[in-house]
């Protein structure tokens, strides 16, 4: 969700209201403090989500493809996970401080960004034991089993990815027979329920929107929801079987906010990234608007007096807006001129305002020597792939800085250009956890000087993604 994505989503929001669009504003753009995040990985100029999520959750930059471990580890090599290379995250720090924690995503809950909160692995793709190739990960534990075996105290887990938790050749309640399920004969969903029952907790597992809507936050302390075999659907295809990102955010906060010591919550609009990889800007921007709705929901359910909310991105994309279109020109249409005609490129063909530097929207095949003519193509269709300068199977991430939007306690600490791992340190400092758990080394000492000893320990909500952290003492 780079700056160009935010700008385009802002315009789309306005145009959906029959305005010109450019004057519109997204929910998180109202936050008073803004900074920039440098997203590179330890070994990569242009980053991936595993390394970036590890950086902003754990406070340490690491290599591309690694989750929850430092740069001593080598991608795909279990033996490289030496003693001390595993990193604890803001989730673990918050749990150690007695706070409640949760994660909400539209991707699989084992995907790179949410996994960086709780897992430790040298390969982001080892989400299930079925993902190990030729025994490559035989000494590593897959991400799904780490979630269930080692993180039973996470109170809210909402997203997709049932296939990573269910036995192969068993029936998924929605899609039928699983052919890509687990090979170790474990049903991790059942194991989660059994563990919660043994601990005497008030828990619910749900797999569809109806069950989700029937969850009473007042009577539920632990909620596990997997709403799709794989990733949840793009917002434009979402059916009544799946809750919206905003609805999941609302329910998560209602459950987590019962803890008087505060909470940490991650909310990820993860399918924005996927649509960009497909070079489908229509889908990407509609998912961005759904994400902005989730941020707005989070703001309405919390107070800026005691909750730090951070909205940022793990990386950008090669997505561009250009061509000098007139004010209010349809965002997904052709670039126009002052007379209302389509502008023509040097090849005498129209071109769209939105494009990618690389991706599947490049020339139609490897032998193409001319740019396809879009005159009769509906470029506003959700399946349309924007044209690209370089033909690739999948559009890549962009290497430029991404924005950080923040409000609430200590949000003023985002004020310039920051290393991405700085975000984790601000979160820990604001909520007095991790290395900043001592009252003399965290925000409590600063606030006490101002408020004569009164300090509200913050909730934190990270919204990608967004983070909500509530602070109470």
Image (spheres, rainbow, N blue to C red):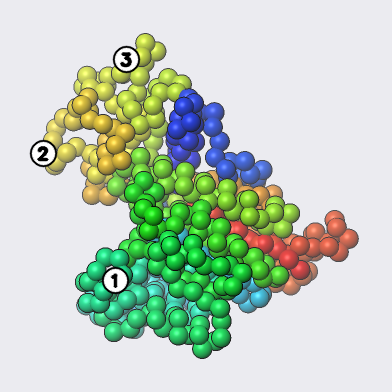
Which residue is identified by label 3? 341
Callout 3 touching callout 2 (CB < 8 Å):
no
Label 1: how many Cα within 10 Å (few below 14, some 14–19, many 20+): some
Q: Are marks 1 and 3 in contact (CB under 8 Å)?
A: no
Picture quadrant where residue 179 is located = bottom left
Q: Residue furthest bottom?
A: 198
Dot 3: what SS? Answer: loop
- Between 255 and 427, the residue placed more toward the observer is 255
Q: Residue at x 76, y 68 (%)?
A: 473
Residue 162 appears at what percent x and percent y? Answer: 35, 69
Circle 1 sits in a helix, a strand or a loop, which is it? strand
Residue where numbered disc 2 is placed: 367
Look at the picture and state if 143 lies above or below 12. Answer: below
In this view, which residue lies farthest toward the top? 339
Give the percent coordinates (x, y) of residue 153.
54, 78
Name the disc covering residue 172, or none: 1
Residue 415 higher or lower than 171, as above or below: above
């Amino acid at each position: 969700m780079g700056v160009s994505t935010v700008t385009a989503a802002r315009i789309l929001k306005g145009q959906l209201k029959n305005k010109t669009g450019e004057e519109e504003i997204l929910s998180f753009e109202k936050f008073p403090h803004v900074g920039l995040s440098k997203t590179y990985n330890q070994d990569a100029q242009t980053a991936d989500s595993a390394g970036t999520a590890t950086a902003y959750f754990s406070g340490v930059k690491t290599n591309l493809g690694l989750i929850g471990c430092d740069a001593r580890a080598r991608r795909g090599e279990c033996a490289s996970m030496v003693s001390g290379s595993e990193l604890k995250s803001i989730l673990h720090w918050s749990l150690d401080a007695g706070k409640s924690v949760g994660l909400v995503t539209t991707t699989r809950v084992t995907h790179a960004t949410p996994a960086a909160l709780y897992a430790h692995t040298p390969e982001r793709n080892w989400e299930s034991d079925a993902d190990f190739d030729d025994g490559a990960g035989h000494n590593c534990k897959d991400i799904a089993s780490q979630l269930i075996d080692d993180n039973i105290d996470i109170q809210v887990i909402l997203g997709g990815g049932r296939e990573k938790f269910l036995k192969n050749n068993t029936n998924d309640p929605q899609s039928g027979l699983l052919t890509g399920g687990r090979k170790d004969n474990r049903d991790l969903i059942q194991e989660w329920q059994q563990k919660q029952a043994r601990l005497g907790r008030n828990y619910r597992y749900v797999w569809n929107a109806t069950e989700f809507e029937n969850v009473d936050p007042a009577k539920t302390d632990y909620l596990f929801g997997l709403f799709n075999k794989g990733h949840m659907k793009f917002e434009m295809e979402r059916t009544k079987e799946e809750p919206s990102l905003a609805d999941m955010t609302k329910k998560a906060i209602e459950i987590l906010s019962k803890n008087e010591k505060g909470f940490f919550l991650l909310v990820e609009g993860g399918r924005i990234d996927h649509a960009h990889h497909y070079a489908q800007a229509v889908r990407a921007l509609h998912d961005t608007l759904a994400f902005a709705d989730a941020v707005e929901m989070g703001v309405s359910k919390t107070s800026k007096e005691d909750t730090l909310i951070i909205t940022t991105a793990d990386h950008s994309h090669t997505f561009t807006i250009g061509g000098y279109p007139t004010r209010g020109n349809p965002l997904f249409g052709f670039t126009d001129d002052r007379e209302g005609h389509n502008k023509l490129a040097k090849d005498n063909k129209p071109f769209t305002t939105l494009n990618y530097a690389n991706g599947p929207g490049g020339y139609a095949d490897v032998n193409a020597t001319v740019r396809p003519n879009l005159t009769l193509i509906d470029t506003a269709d959700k399946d349309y792939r924007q044209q690209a300068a370089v033909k690739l199977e999948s559009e890549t991430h962009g290497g430029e800085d991404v924005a950080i939007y923040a409000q609430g306690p200590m949000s003023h600490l985002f004020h310039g250009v920051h290393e991405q791992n700085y975000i984790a340190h601000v979160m820990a400092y604001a909520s007095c956890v991790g290395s900043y758990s001592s009252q003399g080394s965290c925000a409590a000492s600063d606030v006490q000087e101002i408020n004569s000893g009164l300090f509200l320990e913050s909730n934190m909500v990270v919204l990608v993604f967004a983070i909500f952290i509530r602070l109470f003492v």
